[in-house]
Amino acid sequence: MRIDVVTIFPAFFDVLEVSLLGKARGAGILDVRVHDLRDATHDRHRTVDDTPYGGGAGMVMKPEPWGEVIDAIAGPATEPQDAATDDAPLFIFPSPAGERFTQATARELATEQHLVFGCGRYEGIDERVFAYASTRGRVRLISLGDYVLNGGEVAAMAMIEAIGRLVPGVVGNPESLVEESHEDGLLEYPSYTKPASWRGYDVPDVLLSGHHGKVAQWRHDQQVQRTRERRPDLLAD
Ligand code: 6GU
């Protein structure tokens, strides 16, 4: 999978060099390219923002640098019908005003060939940039949840990690992806390792019993109990 990231803070994405995703990049499974939006400016101050038409607080990201970067990443304009196909890039603009990102979103996006993350700062990006991007590919505004971050960078990182780990070959043992929180609509069951007794805390007897059926039943019960306590909204769904 190819992932392009457009940002005024490329250093936010240095962490993509470590851990599982770093390994996947080294192995050629993930082709991640980070672009500094300011490289597409042409004034001495490398300006990427300006005051909003109509007034109001804060600054808006100017469309021109975005246009240049979109051209550089996606190539020349295609026929409108081609921009809407699965072969065209999928532009993701992290935004608290977007649709909600879930594990289902991550699974869906993990099947894409080419994702482009456009990270906005300030009060947002000039709205015409989304229309322009849609001449080169599909466009989605996606939110991590109902709270506000200073910009799209941290949100993009979270999405890249959630999506990237679902790309075949990134996580060594695919079975470890199955029994996780949210994969079956329930929170994950509790895990323990050796020693069986530690500082007065004991591992539940059933896990030491060697009885696979009872272990599976106990784990499922724990999942339901935890979900009821911590995330009753998930059971309602
Ligand atoms: Cl995707 N962006 C920003 N700026 N804030 C957020 C968010 C995204 N998701 C939750 N809060």
Image: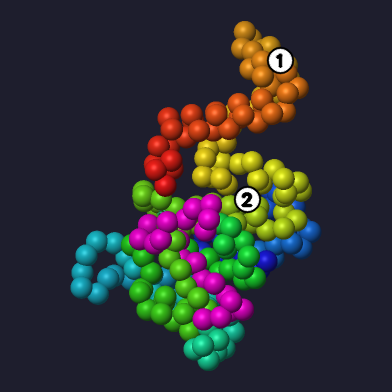
The yes-or-no answer for disc 1 within 8 Å of ligand 1 is no
Where does residue 63 sit, x and y in percent of width and height? 40, 77
Residue 223 in the figure: left or right of residue 236:
right
Where does residue 127 sit, x and y in percent of width and height? 35, 74
Can residue 7 be seen from the camera position used here?
Answer: yes
Secondary-structure class at tag 2: helix
**184 or 26: nearer the viewer:** 184
**Residue topped by disc 2:** 15
Badge number at residue 196: 1
**127 or 168: nearer the viewer:** 168
Where does residue 161 sit, x and y in percent of width and height? 60, 52
**1 or 23: nearer the viewer:** 1
Secondary-structure class at tag 1: loop
Quadrant location of the N terminus in the rendered image: bottom right
Residue range highlighted in magenta: 84-105
**Magenta stretch encompasses residue 85:** yes
Identified by mark 2, the residue type is Val
| Mark before the other along the chain sequence, 2 or 1 | 2
Identified by mark 1, the residue type is Ala
Residue 72 in the figure: left or right of residue 101:
right
Can residue 42 be seen from the camera position used here?
Answer: no
Residue at 49% across / 67% down in the picture?
A: 92
Q: Residue furthest top?
A: 200
**166 or 91: nearer the viewer:** 166
Crowd tier of the residue under label 2, counting other residues whose Cα lies within 10 Å: few below 14, some 14–19, many 20 or above? few
Crowd tier of the residue under label 1, counting other residues whose Cα lies within 10 Å: few below 14, some 14–19, many 20 or above? few
Residue 164 in the figure: left or right of residue 209:
left
Residue at 65% across / 52% down in the picture?
A: 165
**Magenta stretch encompasses residue 10:** no
Residue at 36% across / 73% down in the picture?
A: 126
